Each structure stands twice: as C-alpha cells, then as structure tokens.
C-alpha cells in the first residue's frame, strides 16, 4: 500500500519552477484571470503566466490600486476567489486601500506580492522596493498570509490561502514570494483544493432561535454581505415570520425590492424601534446597535461565520456560528413547530413604503436620475455604487432585485473605489452589463484605468455626475462650518474629451431624459467602455436618512460622522 502510494506520488511529482507551480495551483483552484502590474521581482512568475495564457488571462492595469480594485470587483460580482499580483513595497502599498476594502467586505481576494531576495529580507540593504517588515504590514491587512520559500511549497500554500478565504471570517489572503524564488526549480507535487470545513451546526442554539423568532410579535431581519448566498433562505424565513428585511449597502437584493417586506435604512430604523426580536444575518449590525440603540425589550439573534463578531458591540441572546445558508435551512426546518399564526403584513408594509417615498422625495434630483438608470439597466445588470450623492441616494432608493447586482464599498466607504471595482466586475461578468456611477472627485482616483478598459475591451458604462466639487464635503462646510469652504472645489478636465482621448465612447447628458437616451445607446455597445458625463448642481442632503437619532435605550442624539 505504502509503496503504491509512494509510486503514485512520484508519478505526480514534476520538476518545475515556483512560478509554474503557482500558476498551475491557481488554475486548479478556478482562477481564470489575474489582475496585475509587472516588475522585475515577479518576472519569472509573469513568464509562467505567459506560458499559460490559455488557462489564466493576465489583465494588466496602469496602477496597482486598479489591479487590486479589479480583483475586488471580480470577487464581489462572482462570489468566487480572484487574484492580483504586484511588486513589493510601493506596489503593495499602492494596492493597500483596495485590500483593506476587500477585508471590510469579506471578499475572497488573493494578493500575490513580490519580495526582495530571500536571504536579504529584513537586512535594510536598500534593495529596489525594499520595505521594512512587509509581512507584518500584510498581516495587518488580511487574516491569512505566508511566504512561498520554494517550488515545493507553492501548491500547498496556494491551497491554504484559497481555503482561508472561505473559512471562519471570510476575506482576502496574501502570499509573498522572493525575486530569487519564482524562477527556482524543484520537484513539485500538485495539491487538490482543501475542504472548506463547516463548523457543526449547534442544534440547541438553532432551536432557541426558532423559539424566540417563532414567538416574536414584531420580528425584524437585518441582512448584510454575509447573507448574499442565502437569498432564498432569507426570503423564505421573512415570509414565514412576516418579518421585514432591512438591507443598506452590502445586503441589497438578498430580498428583492419587489417584495414589500424588503425595507431601506430609515424604514428599518422605524421597525427596529418597534421590534421585539431581531435576527442579524452576516452583518455587523453597526448602525442599529451603535446609532439606534438597544434595550432589554429587544432580543438579538445573530448568524455570523466569524465566531468573534456576534458579541463585539452587544452580546446577543443567541449566536449561530457558520455559513448563513445551512444555518438558515436548519432554522427553517425547526421554525414551523414554534411559529405563531401570522397575518400578512404586505398591506401595512406597502403603506409604510409609500409614506417613506414621500419623505425621500426631498432627494428629487438624485431620484430622477436613479429611476432613469433603473429603467435602462436590466434586472441582472450590476450597479456599482460610489461615495457620491447618487450613491448615497441609491443605497436608500435604487430598487435591487437580485443579490450581487448592487456593489457598495461597505464600511470603508472609500472614495474612488468605484470605477476600477466596476471594471473588474465587468471583466469577470462579461455576460451582463455593469454600470459604474461616480462623482467627479471619485472618478479621478482611478480614471487612468480607462486605458485598461480599452486594452482589455471591457464594455463598462460609467456615469459621472460632475458638480465641480467634493460635493459632500462642500455641503458639510456650508451647513456646519459657516460656509467656510476649503479643499472642496475641483478643477476638472473636459471629461468627454478625456475619455475620447483613450478611444472610449463618451457623451454628455444634461437631464434624466437625456441620460435615459445616452444609457440606452451605451448599453447596446458591448465592444468597449463608455463614459457619460452628467453636469449637476448642488444636491439635497441625504444624511437625515442615514445618520439617524437613537430610538431605543435612552440618549437621543445621532452620532456624528467623522
Ligand atoms: C478614501 C477617501 N478619502 C476621502 C473621503 C472623504 N469624502 C467623502 S465624500 C467626498 C467627496 C466626493 O466627491 P465626488 O466624488 O465628486 O462626489 P460628490 O459628493 O460631489 O457627489 C470625500 C472627499 C472618503 N470617503 N474616502
Ligand atoms: Mg463632485
């Protein structure tokens, strides 16, 4: 037996370089594209990519942040692991805001980062791109990281990195590899993808949850990014309980906005004030617990794959640890035995939506543009949000019908993430249209990636709302700082000419009807990028619908946004 196994292993073992071993292992884990910016540290890895271009496409960008955001967008749009590769030091740091965002969004992004020669690491010789304690910097950005030290190690470390992105707290991982290691040859044995261990479901805890939810008079569900793969289960549970489902940024589309039980942030807050039991699925519950408050008449139940998360802000009555989908399935099995008879809340919720729509009408300029977009973007089209006036309004009022069709940056809320993230989403999902919205401020963070869109024929449609300002900052200065404006006005290029100079299609639309027309033409074009510039004025503030005062447990002031 042992001899037969040894023979089989020897047969599977092949002499190859670390770069070749890594490329083989990435392909074996379903990586079909690598977003990258080359440099001498990784030349041997890129050469291995060149020799495997049929299995893995290499999409090169114009800045490392573009590569990392593209990997993030591809991961968010597909739910599957994606990889990017950069040189050490400045390359890593240029990509770091996107890696941080991937961490905040639990996105399976693998960063492959070069290193100086292995024996010189930590010696401060002043090598090209040398940085002190690169591994330590990486370890603060991801939960799992390692350095590949030999060809033999590459398949096993890639398999472990891939596994780490989906177990416990999901999220990005990183692998370093030194300049002298990528090209080194040795005997390499492939490693099959490692199993994604699921923690055993705690049946007593599920039963306790089923009893509390089943008896609840005013249950509420809050769905975050961790519930994206449990859309059917969350929807079924909501119906059984007649519980409204609140989603804000990451959780949009888990329950279709055609369902009257799907509610936005301000309506969710009203319902939070009335609720006796709340189930949080894959969410920090940040706004509800920290802004809206909690008291002893509200029992909180949490489902989270991160064992540390549920007790962080306030200890829940029941914590269920693991993937949302199997846990919700078990909960759905047990609930009917405990569920009280319930009347449909559809009419009540429709009325409440209508009242909320009236309040939201204050955001008329944003809403008019959003309805023009919704009418043109097909239901399975992907809308990529930004930290801009249209984005803030979209989180509250853009109807979303399916999970993973509304990409929003999560709690980092980092300006400038949108355009390159959307490019990655469109690159990975060439079968559906992707639409990026952006302000004039956010767009220029990664606008140079228009060259990437041209080079790799990415048919992304971008709508740029140009108010000549960091409008959100300017409005805060007007309202709170006696109109003392500082650092918020912008000198902009001619965006249409700018896009055209890359060879992209570009046009201007000055009203919602003009936008509809431009968008229809843009979405019909599938051979390259389009930019639509929409000149706009100052827009009404959305903040009264986002930062809202406490409704439970004393204190009434809303927290200020820093
Ligand atoms: C990385 C990062 N830097 C700074 C900010 C602060 N910030 C939030 S909104 C904003 C202005 C956005 O301007 P623009 O993209 O033009 O959108 P507008 O508000 O004008 O619609 C800034 C600077 C941020 N959120 N993220
Ligand atoms: Mg602006």
Image: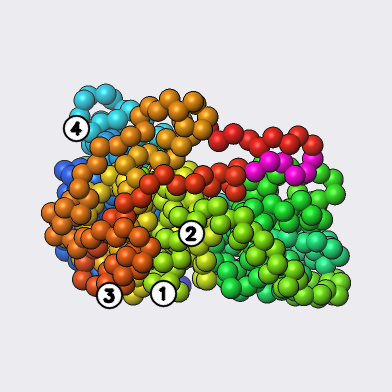
N-terminal-most mark, 2 or 4? 4
Q: CA distance from mark 4 to mark 1?
A: 48 Å
Q: Secondary structure at mark 3?
A: helix
Magenta stretch: give its range: 548-553
Q: Nearer the viewer, mark 4 or mark 1?
A: 1
| Horizontal relation, residue 169 to residue 1: left or right | right
Is the residue 29 above or below the residue 288 in the image?
A: below
Q: Secondary structure at mark 4?
A: loop
Is the residue 196 above or below the residue 311 in the image?
A: below
Q: Residue at x 76, y 51 (%)?
A: 273
Residue 524 is tagged as: 3
N-terminal-most mark, 1 or 2? 2
Q: Quick check: can you spot residue 413?
A: yes
| Horizontal relation, residue 78 to residue 129: left or right | right
Is the residue 374 above or below the residue 412 in the image?
A: below
**Looking at the image, what colour scheme do you see?**
rainbow
The residue that label 2 is drawn on is 367
**Is the Cβ of the residue at disc 3 closer than 8 Å to that at disc 2?**
no
> For mark 3, does the 10 Å Cα neighbourhood hold few (<14), some (14 to 19), or many (20 or more) residues?
few
Q: Nearer the viewer, mark 1 or mark 2?
A: 2
The residue that label 1 is drawn on is 378
Q: Nearer the viewer, mark 2 or mark 4?
A: 2
Q: Position of residue 127 (x, y in %)?
A: 20, 29
Q: CA distance from mark 1 to mark 3?
A: 12 Å
Q: Residue at x 45, y 61 (%)?
A: 368
Q: CA distance from mark 3 to mark 4?
A: 46 Å
Residue 189 is tagged as: none
Using the rendered view, name the quadrant where residue 340 is placed.
Answer: bottom right
Q: Quick check: can you spot residue 14?
A: no
């Amino acid at each position: 037996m042992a001899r037969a196994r040894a023979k089989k292993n020897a047969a599977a073992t092949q002499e190859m370089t670390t770069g070749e071993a890594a490329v083989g292992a990435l392909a074996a884990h379903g990586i079909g594209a690598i977003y990258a910016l080359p440099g001498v540290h990784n030349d041997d890895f890129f050469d291995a990519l060149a020799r495997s271009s049929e299995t893995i496409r290499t999409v090169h960008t114009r800045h490392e942040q573009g590569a990392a955001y593209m990997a993030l967008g591809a991961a968010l749009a597909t739910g599957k692991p994606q990889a990017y590769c950069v040189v050490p030091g400045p390359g890593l740091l240029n990509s770091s805001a996107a890696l941080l965002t991937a961490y905040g969004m639990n996105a399976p992004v693998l960063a492959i980062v070069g290193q100086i020669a292995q024996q010189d690491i930590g010696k401060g010789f002043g090598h090209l791109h040398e940085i002190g304690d690169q591994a330590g910097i990486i370890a603060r950005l991801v939960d799992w990281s390692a350095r590949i030290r030999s060809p033999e190690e590459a398949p096993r470390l890639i398999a472990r990195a891939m596994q780490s992105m989906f177990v416990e707290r999901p999220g990005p991982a990183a692998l370093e590899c030194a300049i002298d290691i990528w090209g080194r040859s040795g005997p390499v044995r492939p490693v099959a993808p490692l199993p994604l261990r699921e923690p055993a479901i705690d049946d007593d805890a599920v039963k306790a949850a089923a009893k509390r939810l089943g008896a609840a008079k005013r249950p509420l569900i809050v769905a975050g990014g961790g519930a994206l793969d449990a859309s059917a289960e969350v929807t079924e549970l909501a119906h059984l309980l007649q519980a409204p489902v609140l989603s804000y940024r990451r959780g949009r589309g888990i329950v279709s906005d055609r369902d009257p039980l799907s509610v936005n942030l301000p309506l969710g807050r009203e319902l939070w004030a009335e609720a006796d039991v709340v189930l949080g699925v894959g969410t920090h519950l940040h706004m509800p617990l920290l802004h809206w408050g909690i008291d002893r008449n509200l029992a909180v139940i949490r489902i989270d794959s991160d064992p540390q998360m549920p007790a962080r802000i306030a200890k829940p009555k029941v914590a269920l640890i693991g993937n949302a989908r199997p846990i919700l399935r078990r909960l759905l099995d047990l609930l009917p035995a405990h569920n009280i008879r319930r009347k449909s809340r559809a009419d009540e919720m429709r009325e409440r939506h209508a009242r909320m729509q009236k309040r939201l009408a204050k955001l008329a300029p944003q809403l008019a543009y959003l309805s023009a977009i919704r009418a043109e973007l097909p239901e399975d089209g992907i809308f990529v949000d930004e930290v801009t006036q249209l984005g803030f309004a979209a989180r509250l009022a853009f109807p979303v019908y399916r999970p993973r069709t509304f990409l929003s940056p999560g709690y980092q809320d980092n300006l400038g993430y949108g355009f390159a993230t959307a490019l990655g989403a469109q690159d990975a999902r060439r079968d559906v249209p992707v639409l990026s919205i952006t302000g004039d401020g956010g767009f220029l963070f990664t606008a140079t990636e228009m060259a990437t869109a041209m080079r790799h024929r990415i048919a992304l449609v971008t709508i740029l709302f140009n108010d000549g300002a960091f409008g959100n900052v300017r409005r805060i200065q007007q309202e709170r700082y006696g109109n003392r404006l500082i650092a918020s006005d912008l000198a902009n290029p001619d965006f249409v000419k700018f896009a055209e100079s890359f060879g992209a299609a570009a046009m201007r639309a000055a009203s919602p009807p003009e936008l509809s027309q431009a968008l229809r033409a843009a979405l019909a074009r599938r051979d390259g990028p389009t930019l639509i510039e929409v000149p706009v004025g100052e827009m009404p503030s959305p903040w009264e619908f986002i930062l809202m005062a406490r409704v439970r447990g004393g204190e009434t002031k809303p927290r200020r946004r820093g």
